[in-house]
């Protein structure tokens, strides 16, 4: 799915409805839309520390259950991913994000808090499966 915003920027995304209330989404957007800068971010750490970047990915007022930086060795380098798990507006969300060549990649899985106990492991696994090659 490709959506266009009024500003002319393109945002790529894909959504998968798992059940009546569970949703897995992948969104790709220019990193300079998240943090105003003239330079393209090459790594997620350029958007800030794990705590600083949470303001970009976690809505204000959300209860954060877990946040961690994950370093993964790829073919030539070590890539950093940020993982956040939080509750917002009766929804439980697991979100994994990274940056490469000026683009931010975000994988998120969400379900009502009441469904998370039953489906949380699968949904969290879906979000954490984000990997750039």
Image (cartoon, rainbow, N blue to C red):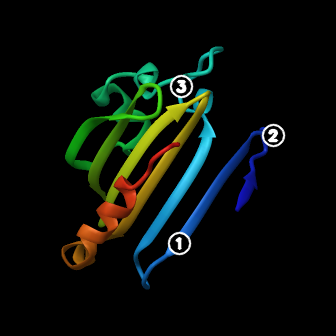
* Left or right placement of residue 82 versus residue 37 in this view: left
Residue tagged by mark 2? Answer: 8
Q: Is residue 83 above or below residue 124?
A: above
User: In this view of the protein, which residue sits in the foreground, 84 or 69?
Assistant: 69
Residue, x 29% and y 66% (percent of image)?
Answer: 90
Query: Can you give x and y, in whole percent of width and height, for residue 118 in the image?
Result: 21, 79
For residue 16, the mark is 1
* Left or right placement of residue 47 versus residue 5 in this view: left
Q: Residues within 10 Å of mark 2 (few under 14, many from 20)?
A: few
Q: Which element carries disc 2, helix, strand or loop?
A: loop
Residue tagged by mark 3? Answer: 35
* Left or right placement of residue 92 versus residue 79 in this view: left
Distance of label 3 from label 2 (alpha carbons): 17 Å
Residue, x 24% and y 41% (percent of image)?
Answer: 67
Query: Can you give x and y, in whole percent of width and height, for residue 98 in the image?
Result: 45, 37
Query: Can you give x and y, in whole percent of width and height, for residue 73 in the image?
Result: 36, 33
Disc on the earlier residue, 3 or 2: 2
Residue 97 seen anywhere in this rendered image of the structure: yes
In the rendered image, the quadrant that contains the N terminus is bottom right
Query: Can you give x and y, in whole percent of width and height, for residue 57 in the image?
Result: 42, 41
């Amino acid at each position: 799915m490709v959506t266009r915003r009024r500003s002319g920027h393109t945002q790529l995304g894909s959504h998968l409805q798992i059940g009546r209330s569970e949703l897995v989404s992948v969104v790709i957007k220019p990193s300079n839309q998240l943090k105003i800068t003239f330079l393209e971010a090459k790594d997620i750490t350029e958007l800030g520390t794990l705590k600083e970047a949470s303001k970009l990915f976690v809505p204000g007022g959300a209860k954060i259950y877990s946040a961690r930086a994950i370093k993964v060795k790829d073919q030539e380098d070590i890539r950093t991913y940020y993982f956040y798990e939080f509750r917002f507006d009766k929804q439980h969300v697991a979100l994994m994000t990274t940056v490469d060549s000026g683009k931010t990649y975000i994988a998120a899985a969400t379900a009502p808090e009441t469904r998370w106990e039953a489906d949380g492991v699968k949904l969290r696994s879906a979000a954490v499966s984000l990997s750039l090659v």
